[in-house]
Amino acid sequence: MKIRHPAEVVAVVVVVVLVAAGTAAAQAGTSHPGYYPIENMGVLAKGDLEVDIDLTGAMLQVAAGAMQSENGEDEDLAKLVAGLERIRVQVGAPQGADATTIAHSFDSAISTMEGAGWSRILRVVDEGEQVYLFARENAGRIAGLTALINDENEEIVLVNLVGDIDPVVLGKVIAKADRLPDLEQFMAGGN
């Protein structure tokens, strides 16, 4: 994936979940205000998915526990994950969707989220690459984050984090993003 800086926040979450918890299926949490149905965007068919993560409950606690290292470097990331109720990640190459379909799916999702009270906090459009990050607030806290990433219609990354996200802890994790593992390096099997 060519997108570096804006997607690092998403990449950090993806790497942590992949390394610490593996893949699990869950259906809980669809009524939570931070939930957004990324799977219903119609841009990635089941056969297109290279990564499909859906974690809740105990599996999230396993991930948070695994992130707590002896020297405490991942303490903020562990706190971030500990407050979540659900993590959903889908990554894939859209085989059955052309550029127009992908653009329409993104536009529709953006319109739906903005109409439902989500705030767009990041938008990057650069040479065929698009990164959108949305947050949904509830009682002064972040109830959910949703990232929509399109890498030149060759790879799509969709992420939905659901739960109590402390804005201060999120800021600390973002600030440390350049010191955390690189998604491409992880996916290639490197350290």
Image (tube, grey):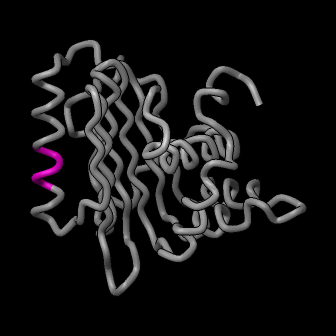
Percent of width and height locating residue 30 = 31, 59
For this orientation, the residue located farthest to the front is 127
Seen as rendered, the residue at the extreme right is: 70
Of residue 7 and residue 77, the one placed in the foreground of this image is 7
Left or right, 163 with respect to 152, comes to right
Q: Is residue 39 above or below residue 156?
A: below
Q: Residue at x 27, y 21 (%)?
A: 153
Q: As drawn, is 176 to the left or to the right of 165?
A: right
List x then y, in percent, for residue 187.
62, 25
| Quadrant of the frame with the C terminus | top right
Q: Is residue 155 magenta?
A: no
Between 62 and 100, the one lying in front of the other is: 100
What type of secondary structure mainly makes up the magenta span? helix
- Over which residues does the magenta segment extend? 108-112
Residue visible at 36% across and 40% down in the picture: 158
Q: Is residue 127 left or right of residue 162?
A: left
Which of the 4 quarters of the picture holds residue 47?
A: top left
Name the image quarter holding residue 45: top left
Q: Is residue 7 left or right of residue 19?
A: left
Name the residue at 26% across, 26% down.
Answer: 128
The vertical placement of 71 against 100, above or below, is below
Residue 62 percent coordinates (x, y):
70, 56
Q: Position of residue 180 (x, y in %)?
A: 68, 47
The residue lying at 63 percent from left, 36 percent from top is: 182
Furthest residue to the bottom?
139
**Circle count:** 0
